[in-house]
Amino acid sequence: MEKLIDLSPVERPANAQPWAKIQPRLKGVIALSSVLPAVIALAFLLISGNEFMGVLFTVFLPLQILAGGFAGFYGFGRRGILDGLLLVVTYFFATFVLVLLVSVLWSVIENGGKAISPHFFYQNNVYVDPTAPLEIGGVGHAIIGSFLIVGLATVITVPLGIATAVYITETQGKSRGLIRSLLQAMSGLPSVVAGLFIYALLIASGITQYAGFAGSLALIPLMLPTVSRVAEEALRLVPKELRNGALALGAPAWRAFLQVTLPAASSGIVTAVLLGVARVIGETAPLILTTFSANNTNLNIFEGGMSTLPTYLYNYVTMGFDTSLQRAWGAALVILILVGVLFAAARFATRSTPAPKAKKRK
Amino acid sequence: MSAQFHLSSENVNVWFGERHVLKDVSLQFPTNQVTALIGPSGCGKSTFIRTLNRMHELIPGAGFGGKVLLDGQDIYEESVDPVNVRIKIGMVFQKPNPFPTMSIKENVLSGLKLSGRKNDNPAELVETSLRRASIWNEVKDRLNEPALSLSGGQQQRLCIARGLAMDPEVLLMDEPCSALDPGSTRRIEETILELKDSMTIVIVTHNMQQAQRVADQTAFFLSEDGNPGHVVEFGPTDDVFNKPIDSRTNDYVNGHFG
């Protein structure tokens, strides 16, 4: 009888990555070279009593580089030295930056957490003096102010930013290069200058008093470069074959853009908007100059001072009392949460659209 | 004089910037015939086919001289809207380009939507268009799935169906099979032969066998020594392949160069 070949799948064996095998002796050297410098540096730190940062960079890093080079040489000969060095340097600085970021995040969460309670989110600041206990008062008015001011700025900036991106990517306009360079320059604009500009234009000249919408106007030049440049990237990623396909079907350019190019770039454009919002939600200087601040909840964006989270934070830091500092930390945490939510939303928006890869189906 | 032909070109010249890339191309495309454009890479045949439905002018720096006559009317005349030209003259590209944000059905109907026209019976139009592109049986149960869920060959036939839904008089195909496997290629060739009963077809191809299988007449393009591309030989496919007048045609169709 004919022998049948077994074609059923088998379980993945434990050693299915033969390229990842490391000799046990080499493992020992790597372990030693990773631990030894840390131990020596720690001992040095305790005995000499020098500053941590100094010891980190003058004792630990050189030792660790030496050890990495040695481990590389031991394992792979001369070509291993550079590999080892590079590995050490990469890991060291990556860890260093990560520790810095996490420590900033942690200090905001730790200090801000003390001020946070449900009422901190919805109460406003009326009748709250700087030394008042944390049981009363909150940033409700500032959250509303931030939403109103950033919202108005977004409503104005997004069409402008997308239109700019469309001009740069979809037309043969002669000043495309110039506008791109200007946008690039604008993204380096100090935010206080944007605030001063609106202050001089609208408030110092007496056209209007401090008001929320002046703050929105000051945020526009800060938000515009981010929105238009991210939207530009998104539009540029749409294959030109799609646009040509639409035009070849007899579509006028505007329909081809609205019905083919724009939907294909939609996730990128949502990202552009969210990144733009995240860019300005923490801006302080332009708002101090244009919206002033308020303790009450002001819903009228065209009249009267208005508090926002960053200006609230600034005010309470400058007061300098223990409880006012706590409130400032709390406001910082609220901003951090908002930005976090925005970035998560941006990630989600980018991911949830149909990937432009053909999913083959038999 | 050329009114007896459905579509024809008279002394078409093309420049990109200052570079002259196509010189004095005069070809006639009769109704219900397939015309193949062959020639080595860079000889200007893709450029030429794009002048036939005014897709050429979308390339920055493009220049054009001469006439393209559709039913005796020069489509480059000032009074002619390129949008109307492209509605009458459909095009299928080298790379399948279904619209990724649309379903299979929406892709077929996209031409109507994009040109702002209405159809009383979209379901029927979807079926006839997909049938004419011989892909109906494969997709009839999944019309609402995204177009990108199809295989490459199916995507290309969907693009043909999308063009056919506009009921064009002329179908231009720019190397429609170069990204496809032999099976899909054969199916598209069968589709071409069925379609020619109802329209005029122009196809650019690098595949000599394909030209011989589908084309009634063939034009051989060549660009030599940096000179602009031009038509070396134009005639019935049999003649061009089996008894070419020009020795360069003979060398090319027999695989001696290019």
Image (cartoon, coloured by chain):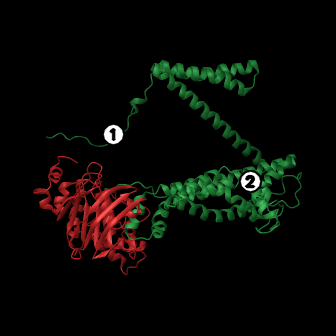
Chain colours: A green, B red
**Mark number for residue B161?**
none
Tell me the amino acid under the disc marked 2: Val
**Picture coordinates of residue A232, whole percent (x, y):** 54, 56
> Residue B91 at what x, y percent from top left?
32, 66
Q: Quadrant of the N terminus of chain B?
A: bottom left
C-alpha gap between disc 2 and disc 1: 66 Å
Image position of B29 (left or right of A361): left
Q: Which residue is mark 1?
A: A10
The crowding category of the residue bearing disc 1, from other C-alpha atoms within 10 Å (few below 14, some 14 to 19, many at least 20), is few
In the drawing, what numbered circle is on residue A193?
2
Residue in front for this viewpoint, B226 or B159 = B226
Q: Is residue B94 left or right of residue A263?
A: left
Q: Earlier in the sequence, mark 2 or mark 1?
A: 1
Residue A246 in sight here: yes
Residue B145 visible at all? no
**Image x and y of residue A14, in percent:** 41, 33
Residue B163's quadrant in the figure?
bottom left
SS of the residue at dot 1?
A: loop
